[in-house]
Image (tube, rainbow, N blue to C red):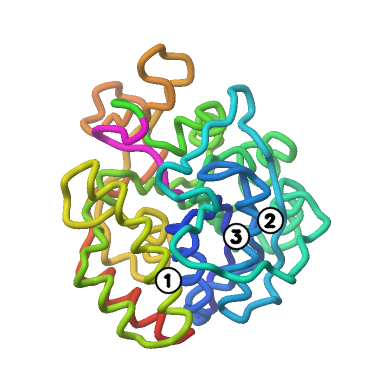
Amino acid sequence: MAPRALILDCDPGQDDAVALLLALASPAEVELLAVTTVAGNVPLARTSENARKVLELAGRRDVPVHAGCPRPILVPLETAEYVHGETGLNGVELPPPSLPLAAEHAVDAIVRLVMERPPGTVTLCPTGPLTNVALAIVKEPAIVPRLAEIVLMGGAKELGNVTAAAEFNFFVDPHAAAIVFECGAPVTMIGLDLTHQVLITEERLARIRAIGTPLAEAVAGFLAFYNRYDRERYGIPGAPLHDPCVIAHLIRPELFRGKRCRVDIETEGRFCRGRSVVDWWNRSGRPANALVLTEADALGFFDLLVERLARL
């Protein structure tokens, strides 16, 4: 079977960086057409720089990086340096990238790549706020029926992580999230209910470090920093490794379980802005618009991740 063509739309962030590396390490399953960056975990200049740093760390200067939107559609940008550090990749010192940014804006690159490829062959993988993806849909609605699917990290069936109600990516740009879930493309949602089962314990971090390569040492370094905030905040044995679950699902879908249901995004609520309202029991009777994944085989996930990082 030919590898699945994908565009990784991200806001690196340590967990986005691991998602990017997992995709690069899996050429038999995925073909990474491009990386598009958005403001989220840190501002756009940082996310665009970090994506290029990670590509150079993996020796993959052939993958273009397209900078996208520097802020959400309607609301002010809120970032998460309190989790990821000032650079977004705190915990390791990577050299400044020599790889230049591609001249084409991320929104235009998404539209072009989807339209020039055969219908049903390109998967969008957003792991940050959905601003770029939403604006690509608004700019060229013809991309929607041509997509294979949108597999995203965001939302929650239960509690949020940036507010009591909302997950960070959807909170940062709730209007973009609403556009994506209403667009009609096949959507797979990987939210906090799942990612909080995939924890970076000390044992798992040691497995990555034991690979013994400079790349693995760098990954262990920035994950050790990333591990601090959520571990202390939630009193859990390690931070959730959110974004790589998107790529792992494409490579090994049997590691994840969920069901199709209706998801709506609260855009205006005083207390619930960015809340993903998951109609798990179909109380509304409205048609499902997403596959919501809620269970993960964490051991299988980390076996996959360690095996793939050892390839780079």
145 vs 196, left or right, is right
Residue beneath the point at 40% across and 61% down: 244
Between the residue at mark 3 and the residue at mark 2, the CA separation in whole angstroms equals 24 Å
Residue 64 in the image: above or below residue 291: below
Q: In terms of sequence position, does the residue under pointer 1 or pointer 3 come before the other?
A: 3
Residue most extreme to the right: 103
In the image, which disc is placed on residue 50? Answer: 3
Residue 190 image offset from top left, x and y in percent: 36, 49
Q: Amino acid at mark 2?
A: Val
- Foreground label between 2 and 1: 1
Secondary structure of residue under mark 3: helix
Residue beneath the point at 19% across and 72% down: 203
Between the residue at mark 2 and the residue at mark 1, the CA separation in whole angstroms equals 31 Å
Residue 241 image offset from top left, x and y in percent: 33, 57
Q: Which residues are magenta?
A: 152-162
- Foreground label between 3 and 2: 3
Q: Amino acid at mark 1?
A: Val
Mark 1 highlights which residue? Answer: 219
Mark 2 highlights which residue? Answer: 114
Q: In terms of sequence position, does the residue under pointer 2 or pointer 1 come before the other?
A: 2
Q: Nearer the viewer, residue 63 or 228?
A: 228
